[in-house]
Amino acid sequence: MKGGERVIKQTLLTDRILTDKERKNLAILEVIRKNGPISRTDVSKLTEFNIVTVSNYVNHYIKKGLVVEGELDESTGGRKPVLVELNPNAAYIIGLGLNMMNMVGILVDLGTNILYEVTREKAPENSEKMIQELVNLCDEIMQKSGVEKEKIVGIGVGVPGIIDERGRTIRWPGALGSKDLSVCMSIKDSFEKRFNIPTFTENDANAAVLGEKWLGLDRDVRHMIYMFSGVGVGILIDGQIYRGASGAAGELGVYSPLMHNQEFVKTSALHVGRWEMDLGMCDSARQLLKEGEDSLLRELVNNNLDKLTVKEIIKASREKDALAIRVIEEAGHNLGRKIAFLVNLLNPEVVVLGGGIEGFGAILLDAVKGAVKEWAIEEAANVVKIIPSAFRENSIALGVVGIVSREIFAQA
């Protein structure tokens, strides 16, 4: 792609109505991305566009360098058809995501092959400083990846909280019973002023649900939930991210019950929605240890319970520690009841567990499945598949990469 062609529209596909040309661009290039090398005839069959239309569009992509011709396909008679595939070196994209314990930055080519990846521990609290750390992480990727900046066509940033429709402000949820943090610094502007590259921002759970669908799951999955720990949900309805009237869809629970004490809020949150990122496991484990129960966890934190994190609980559970397993199972059961409510409400085909909780493995997953089977209506429970995230800590970064890629495809 030439330098003059690298500027892409700054509005997300899911926030506007596609033109007929954009719709065809996206459909054809998505088929080539997922199935290439592929013949024009097979592209026509999969997209249900006539062969003349497909050939015209593909020829245009070849001229732009987005698609290349390759080998000849096997022929059942007559001239062998030429196969086409995406040119992965046509453009590059940077994706940045915040997870429970770290921030992840990746650089991918147009075929979504990860060429460079870096992970950094993140500060325990979200703040304007966090935005600057993400900007610095992006700069590090540009400096060390070896890819020419002129070939990077977009940056995607996935963060928790409620983002306004232009990425100008963000409201981050505080800890339970504390005030939320509103950040007026624009994530979008911070990146575009520093790098002069189009930047897209998206809520973490929304980005993750798109990443799982776009890269991992069968294309026929149309209704899906990404459970970002117990605090947020990415919702896919009929193949599209559902954001709601003001972009706040998927933020579970009551947001600012500051008139109540923190213990009341924590107890109520288990029933009405909003939890801590770790599903309350660390608090539960600390309480049991203070009551004198024996556990490997004491040794892992040198008897300093304030240092207990999900990392120690995961490690102890893998050593078959009874207390750690009990804490995880209880959290999984509570999460499963919440998921059962969403399954009854939305009737999804798939629920993906992510945001860090997938690291608790089969102990958590089995507890969640058991609770959903118990609490969801039979018609919904029999349909839904509950699976761990396929991309784990890369889900958010890959999801925002998908958003940028879809924009490039649509405007091809």
Image (cartoon, rainbow, N blue to C red):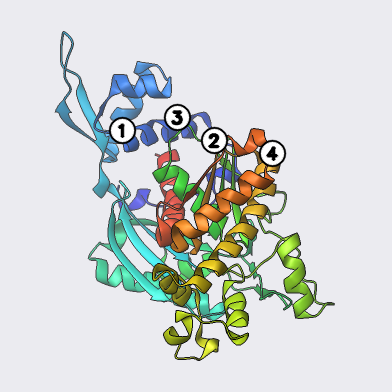
Residue at 79% from the left image edge and 75% from the top image edge = 264
Foreground: disc 3 or disc 1 = 1
Tell me the amino acid under the disc marked 3.
Lys
Numbered mark located on residue 377 in the image: 4
Which one is earlier in the sequence, the residue at label 2 or at label 1?
1
Q: Residue furthest right?
A: 259
Q: Which residue is drawn at 32% across and 55% down?
A: 108
Q: SS of the residue at dot 4?
A: loop
Q: Which-is-in-front pick, marks 4 and 3?
A: 4
Please name the amino acid that badge 1 sits on. Asn
* Separation of residues labelled 2 and 1 (CA atoms): 19 Å
3 or 2: mark nearer the eye: 2
- Alpha-carbon neighbours of circle 2 within 10 Å: few (<14), some, or many (≥20)? some
Label of residue 35 in the image = 1
Q: Position of residue 365 (x, y in %)?
A: 50, 54
Of residues 246 and 154, the one drawn nearer to the viewer in this rendering: 246
Could you tell me how far apart the alpha carbons at marks 4 and 1 are, in whole angstroms?
37 Å
Labels 2 and 1 touching (C-beta < 8 A) = no
Can you identify the residue that label 3 sits on?
A: 24
Picture layout, residue 111 above or below residue 42: below
Q: Residues within 10 Å of mark 4 (few under 14, many from 20)?
A: some
